[in-house]
Amino acid sequence: MNNSTYASLPLSDFFYFCPNYLRAQMFKYLKYNRQLTNVIGLWFVAGYLFSASLYVLVPATLFILGGKFKYLIIFLGFWFVLILSDARGGFESASIVKILYVLLLVYFASQKGILNLNRSYQYFIPFIAISVISLTFSPIIFDAAQKTLSYFLLLLVVPSFVSFLLRTNKNMFLLGLVYTGALVLLLGLVMRVIQPEFAIYAERYSGVFGNPNGVGIFSLLYNMLWGIIKHHHPHLFSRKDRIVVNALIIISVLLCASRGALLSVTMFYALDYSVRKKNPFVAAGVVVVFLSFFFMENIIGWLYQIGLGEYLRAQTLENGSGRIVAYEFAWEQIKLNPIFGMGFGYSEYWFHKEEVEIVLNLLNHQGNTHNSYLTILMDTGFMGGIAFLVAWGTMFSKSIKQSPFGVPVLIIVLFSSNVEAWLAASLNPFTIIIVTILALLSDQAFTKK
């Protein structure tokens, strides 16, 4: 069965086993929180029909909500705008609106004293300082400066808002995180039925995201967020909730056919089981089994034998779907300025130069480096790369001390960011999730029952 077959399967086949569960508490929550649902729905419909309307609609909504101290909706709305900025089909304005949105978040946070609640952004000050030095070598200095600032602002406001919302309205905040993510996955499946050209890209399911890998990364990170919240606060969710949310995640991952997401989600389920059962041997065994696949000489033939060859695009495994080519090209660019790099956004700029894209397409590669660490080395050099790893490592170490889920999250992020470049960017739908996860795990207001 090939990818286009999976993309065109009727959703009724997937939901056949749980039609009555669509009336679960998740939808009751959305009904009881109509303001959040209405805001998200209004922005999506308005942006889809007339993209430029978001320039006025989003800021106006934020000032109305800010005047009523609706900070939960403001925070979740920011996540949704980041998702829209990654979508296709007329949401170009969201790429500009998200910049204004993060500035307004800083404004609201400073007015309310929220910024003092979490100072984890301090770990990234050396990295940001090196990134500023890298600007002097950038061929796109304005865009590079904007991306540098946005990376810092995301790390400034998101952990602070997480701490604030945990202390003011914890249960509603945690429910909001879970159900907003579920609503995004559900919205993608609905669009696949009513507007297939919006939700299918290159014969693969892409949901409300720009490409199938976007669905995979989102589903993976959201699955970790969901698993962590469910573990620490199980009383918030009914059995029906668990069935619906898990079904949305699994269906989305299967439809997008992202190999990295399939592998990572499966690994996290095993690691989650290991944490709950307090059995480290399960986790170790799963990691060894999955790593062994990379060393199987006949893995391509084996996948075809079991009927998964076409679905997993096994024919591209030999050259890593073009990633090996991208890595080689990236290293050549890193050598040009190995100390400080060429400024934030340089990797994206260089890989999308017309003459470079022509060569890469001939070598069976599309996109950028597909590696967060190579992207950081291209952008900020080895000085920035070291500061980057130290900053993220410090955040992870705090979460590991507070929660048993710190290590599983670290393992999955190391794997996922090694095959995709999402961790090297700020205003995307993905980095905000891992920042939120680490802010939750390192805060006793979340980990203490």
Image (cartoon, rainbow, N blue to C red):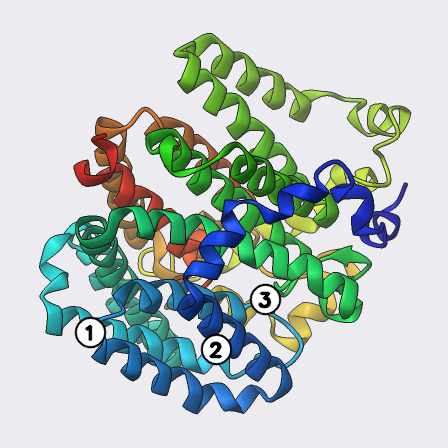
x and y percent of residue 40 in the render?
A: 48, 70
Return the residue nearer the eye: 60 or 237. 237
Alpha carbon distance from label 1 to label 3 = 37 Å
Is 195 rendered above or below residue 333? below
Q: Which residue is mark 2?
A: 95
Q: Which residue is mark 3?
A: 351
What amino acid does circle 2 point to? Ser
Alpha carbon distance from label 1 to label 2 = 21 Å
Residue shown at 9%/58% (left/top)? 116
Q: Which residue is mark 1?
A: 108
CB atoms at circles 1 and 2 under 8 Å apart? no
Q: Can residue 130 be seen here?
A: no
What amino acid does circle 1 point to? Phe
- In the rendered structure, which disc, 3 or 2, sits on the residue that comes first in sequence? 2
Q: Quadrant of residue 70?
A: bottom left
What amino acid does circle 3 point to? Phe
Residue shown at 75%/38% (left/top)? 317
x and y percent of residue 442 in the render?
A: 22, 38
**Quadrant for the N terminus in the image:** top right
